[in-house]
Amino acid sequence: MLTPHLQKKLDEKWNNCWPVSDLRPLALLDLISYLFFIKKLDDWELIHQRVKTAGADNFIYTKEIEEFTWSKLQKLNAREIQQLFNKEHGVIDLMKNYANLNALYSDFFKAPLLIDPTPKLIFNAIEIINIIETSDKISQGYIIEYLFDKSKVSAQKEQEFLPEYICRLMVSIAEPETKDAILNLSVGNGNLLINIYRHLYNNINSVGQSPSNIFIESKINGIESDLIKLRLAAMNLVLHGIKNPKIRSATTENKLLTENPTLIISSLIFSNDNSLTEKNNTDTGKLEKENLLLTEIVETLKPGGRAVILVPQVLLKSDNPGIIKTRKNIVDHSSLEAVITLAAKTESVYSGAGILFFNKSKTASENIWFCKWGKSKKKTINESLSDNNSQNDDFEFNELTEILNKWKDRKDEKDFSNNSFFISANFIKTNQYNLSFNDYKLIRQKQPLDTETESINTGETEKILAAKKENLHEFFEATAPLPEEKRKRMVVPVIAAIIILMLGGAAYYWFYLKDNHSYSKNKITNSISNINVSNASKEAQAKTLQMKSPANKTDNDPAPDNTTTKSAVTENSTTENTTSTNESSKKYTVINKTWFHFGPDQGKIKPVFLNPRKDVVLTPQAEENGFVYVVYVNSKGQSTRGWLNKKDLEPVE
């Protein structure tokens, strides 16, 4: 635990960084983690040794950098430290060269700092690191937890990491074992991995064996696409006793899922948009990444393995065909055992989220256990006045204990409540594989049910079952249908929508089509099947391309017609690359799984990729920094634009 004296010292250094400590606490934590790993590498004298061995031709060693050590850094004043870091061929440039090596902690320097450190910021960050380093091992874990808690004062949702009680719930359900190969797809700040580490450590210790940190560390793997979070998580893991965390960036040359793990435990909540709640299930465009990862988890999980995945509420009930297909795959081809819905809290990005627990087995789901986190306790005026974080935490962990008790006794449970019950998988299939707890209702009935209706016996005279809320009348004999609600008049909204569409169409014509009508005259219908393109069409298409070069086109520019969006073709296709700037440009084919990027930069990855295909030939429109810019069109005519790494491509003659 933190002593009052130690807490006071941390508060003083943190508050000295105002206003950054209040407005952008994540930037301050990032600076601390950056300096923390410089300190660790300097302790082992690895920085100069590895950079010199690699022969960094573009880096010039000055006397200051040659003699740079953490101890000598302490003798400089704040401005001298800041100048040493930011100068050309200074400490930051030195660490950029180290990041390019395959060395200890090198991945944690690939991302630049979120903020240019001022003398005041860098001086106080160093002081905080000195406090950490002079504390005992147990206190170091409490210190970093305290700093993460202080960062929660910001209202920015991107700084909200997975809460401790959710981490404990997921790990307790997963029950990781030392024989498992464990993978976490979204490390965040590392709290989930720390809870897995503690669980394994305690299990080994409970059977009288001496836990080996190195052995436990080898069982835990993590992936994080956000390089800033990767650095924060690494510092958190090191300060909790994991000296060499096996976490890496999803942008490395390694494929996203190659470990074939036996246990995948992860949170797939990446959106910071509060509109993605159970009240709005129409905005599914932002769930493409989540749905893609969930599909890969199901496909990659080792047979006999299990997964505990936290997903947004929308993914549980969306009527999007792609998301329904993913849910169908889990229910029909895996054994979905439980869906646990978290409490609805408007201030949290985890409001109403669901935890899926399923096994990769040959047996399909039969009865699925549904459970919902209890509603928040109503507080009296006196409780509200004296409310603090510890009281709220106590309530969360009490609810956590109750859910875990229900989880352990779920198969023997006879007295079902409104917050937990089983639903037949066959019934879920008839409801578009809807997994949202809020769309089902528990019904108690003392009369005998129809033989065709599935039920769960709880006694001789009482029957109990779960059903869709809107179809409750179907489960009672001789009961009149529920009265239909009177339809509200929709005349005014419909007229308003028509007017808006007309105005939008007129504006679109005036500002776009009017000045670009030549595009529509030369439109060419492209498809995957082989078609003959006339020479006259090719000439008209080339003239159109002269009006707009790739250098001036961004990912957000609208395509005038199909000829400017389809640049990926097969060897048997006659589809032309109408946006190429040079007819003699090299053409490439995909040899490795390659990800699209927003720019010619390894850190600007898009959640879209191409699988290796020798039959697809790409014609680049631009080339920069080892990347080529292409426009790929699939068989459905959908185009994807972006930069591809040339390492994943192979030139074709």
Image (spheres, rainbow, N blue to C red):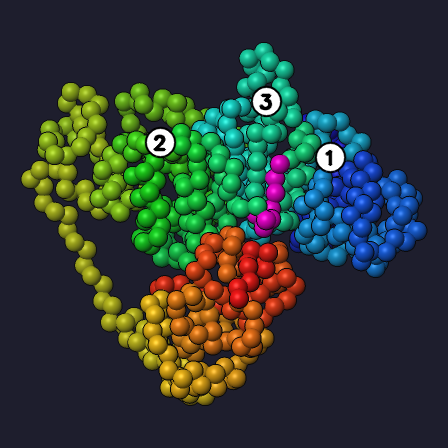
Residue type of the residue flagged with mark 1: Gln
Mark 3–mark 2 distance (CA, rounded to whole Å): 28 Å
Upstream in sequence: badge 3 or badge 2? 3
Count every numbered label the image shows and give the total. Answer: 3
Distance between the alpha carbons at the discs numbered 1 and 2: 50 Å
Q: Foreground residue, 467 or 258?
A: 258
| Residue 199: x %, y % from top left | 55, 25
Which mark, residue 158? none
Residue 265 seen in this snapshot: no
Horizontal placement of 292 versus 366: left or right?
A: right
x and y percentages locating residue 273 in the rendered image: 48, 55
Q: Main secondary structure of the magenta part?
A: loop
Q: Is residue 344 left or right of residue 25?
A: left
The amino acid type of the residue labelled 3 equals Tyr
Q: Residue at x 62, y 36 (%)?
A: 246
As helix, strand or loop, the secondary structure at mark 1 comes to: helix
- Label 1, on which residue? 7
Specify the amino acid type for callout 2.
Ser
How busy is the neighbourhood of tag 1: few (under 14 within 10 Å), some, or many (20 plus)? Answer: few
Q: Based on the displayed image, in which of its 4 quarters is residue 570 positioned?
A: bottom left
Q: Nearer the viewer, mark 3 or mark 2?
A: 2
Give the residue at x 72% y 42%. Answer: 103
* Residue underneath mark 2: 361
Over which residues does the magenta segment extend?
Answer: 246-253
Q: Residue furthest top?
A: 208
Observer-side mark, 1 or 3, equals 3
Please tell me whether mark 2 sits on a helix, a strand or a loop.
loop
- Return the x and y of residue 337 as percentages of the image width and height: 35, 32
* 51, 560: nearer the viewer: 51
